[in-house]
Amino acid sequence: MERVSTTPALVAISHGTSSPAGQAAVSALVTAVAQRLPDVTVRLGHVDVQQPDVAASLDALPEGAPTVIVPLLLSAGYHVRVDLKQQSKGHDGVVIAPALGPDPRLVDALLARLEPLAPAAEDAVVLAVAGSSDDRANDDCRAIGDMLAQRLGRRVTVGFLAAAEPRLRTAVTDAGTRTRGRVVVANYLLAPGYFHDLAVQLADGASVARPLLDDDEPMSGLVELVIDRYVGARPLSD
């Protein structure tokens, strides 16, 4: 009989994307997490679009193995509150950690991505977010916008790509009427893919920062954030 480890596995669950660049970026993050946790089984799965899905990711572990699912999602919307619970149903010993955001380390990453665009004092900043049918997730994104505004010392307008208002194109247009400088778009998307391409399109020529994960090495703060979500959700007896 296979011996089941008492150290919980970490199953990182992304949204999933058909973009090869996005897949590689998310995979690189999970690889970096695994390198930091050599004694933990670390796996990557997806709640949509890609395989393995949540159930297959859990089925690949020894039966009864304690597991922490860490959503690689920036806010707690439908996927976190409903999908992950439904798709992990029937698997014992599974704990679902909170979403990655809001968290100051995500603001650190946004600032690092904005830096190459060198926003001037007179430039307006818009935060591009995906948007959710669950307004609690949208509130999480608005909270990040407020945190970014505090760090930048200027107003930051949130523009949604779907499901909520104002939409990004409207937010960029409105920001342009308030400034004599540029409109710069901070990119609160985890990785390249459909929504990043949509953000560039809807920005109507405004400078758009790179997503939090891209073709470079994952930022250490993002790696630490995933690990902290895992450690914080582990049973106290571990």
Image (cartoon, helix red, strand yellow):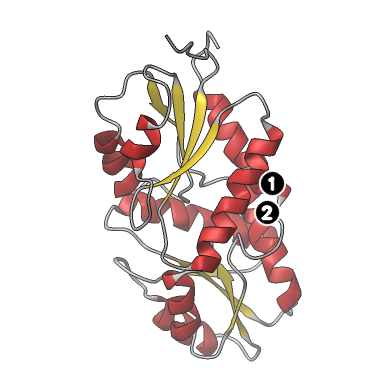
Quarter of the rendering occupied by the N terminus? top left
- Which amino acid is tagged 2? Pro
Q: Nearer the viewer, mark 2 or mark 1?
A: 2
Q: Is residue 40 left or right of residue 75?
A: right
Residue located at (42% from left, 72% from top): 194
- Which amino acid is tagged 1? Gly
Residue located at (63% from left, 45% from top): 31
Quarter of the rendering occupied by the C terminus? top right
Instruction: Check disc 2 and report the residue beneath it.
Output: 218
Q: Is residue 152 left or right of residue 189?
A: right
Whether residue 189 is visible = no
Q: Secondary structure at mark 1?
A: helix
Whether residue 70 is visible = yes
Q: Are marks 2 and 1 in contact (CB under 8 Å)?
A: no
Q: What is the crowding at mark 2: few (fewer than 14 residues within 10 Å), some, or many (at least 20)?
A: many
The disc label shown at residue 91, or none: none
Q: What is the crowding at mark 1: few (fewer than 14 residues within 10 Å), some, or many (at least 20)?
A: some
Quadrant for residue 37, please give it: top right
Q: How many marks?
A: 2
Q: Secondary structure at mark 2?
A: loop
Residue 11 at what x, y percent from top left? 47, 35
Instruction: Check disc 1 and report the residue beneath it.
Output: 221
